[in-house]
Image (cartoon, rainbow, N blue to C red):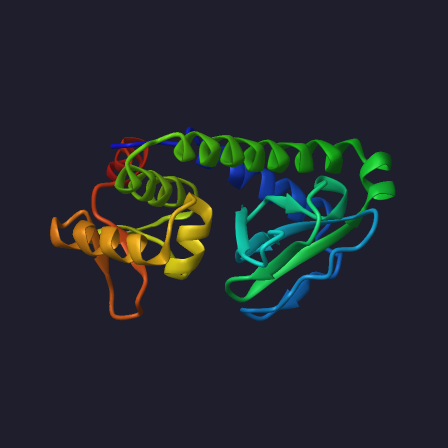
Amino acid sequence: MVFTQAHEANGRDSFLDRLETSYEKRSLVHLGAGSHVPLLKKKVWLVVRGMVKLSAISIHGDELLLGLAGPNEPFGDPLTNVEAYDAQTLMDSDLLCLSCEELAESPHLSTAVLQGTAARYRQSEALLALLGLRRIEDRVRGFLELLANDYGQPCDQGLRLNVKLTHQELASALSTTRVTVTRVLGHLRAEGWLHINKDRLLIIAHQPLKNQRAIRA
């Protein structure tokens, strides 16, 4: 195993329970897959269901994958200093839009959002650590393990990633080329570490240990 992200599933569940209990009368914004999320001044978005890709455009016009925001995780203009910042849903998603004033006035909500921000921070640190690995195969393995540990769904073959990332998006996240990512993924499939199901979703056969224990439990 290249990398395992520490994560408490119970913490996420309790976070979502508190959020939906306190704000069950609020209207969620539903966006279909592939929708761009408007980044508004002094507004923070919170993912309730689904997945959002966070990216930027380099000075050379290339897309850079900055990270993902999954359930219970926030993103938005107040949380970044990156220019040309963009957010796009990777699947059908339900989002909650919160103003900075609301966060300041609600200790309960601000604490909950802080927990989600901490998860995003740990993800960013993990991505930076992966970029320090010399072998591209280790970067790809580590990135897929990170996604599986954070967002994977148990299935018969391992942990299924319900989010679809293109080879180019993987390459952008790991500072390599699309051709190299395609080659590495082929190698991982050949050795049985990675599977692709009929819906073209990735399945990590060798699950992080924490998830293996959770599945057996």
Report the side of 13 relative to 37 (left or right): left
- In the figure, 153 relative to 149: above or below? below
Is residue 70 at all visible to an observer of this figure? no
- In the figure, 45 relative to 1: above or below? below
Quadrant of res 109: top right
Q: 123 or 179: nearer the eye?
A: 179
Is residue 73 at all visible to an observer of this figure? yes
Q: Position of residue 75 (x, y in %)?
A: 66, 46
Q: Looking at this rendering, what residue extends furthest in the left direction?
A: 191
Which quadrant would the C terminus be assigned to in this image?
A: top left
The number of discs equals 0
Report the side of 149 relative to 76 (left or right): left
Q: Position of residue 137 (x, y in %)?
A: 26, 42
Residue at left 64%, top 65%? 36
Which quadrant would the N terminus be assigned to in this image?
A: top left
Q: Looking at this rendering, what residue extends furthest in the front direction?
A: 60
Report the side of 119 relative to 200 (left or right): right
Quadrant of res 162: bottom left
Q: Position of residue 181 (x, y in %)?
A: 31, 53
Residue at left 64%, top 67%? 30
Q: Position of residue 98 (x, y in %)?
A: 78, 49
Residue at left 60%, top 44%? 73
- In the figure, 34 relative to 10: above or below? below
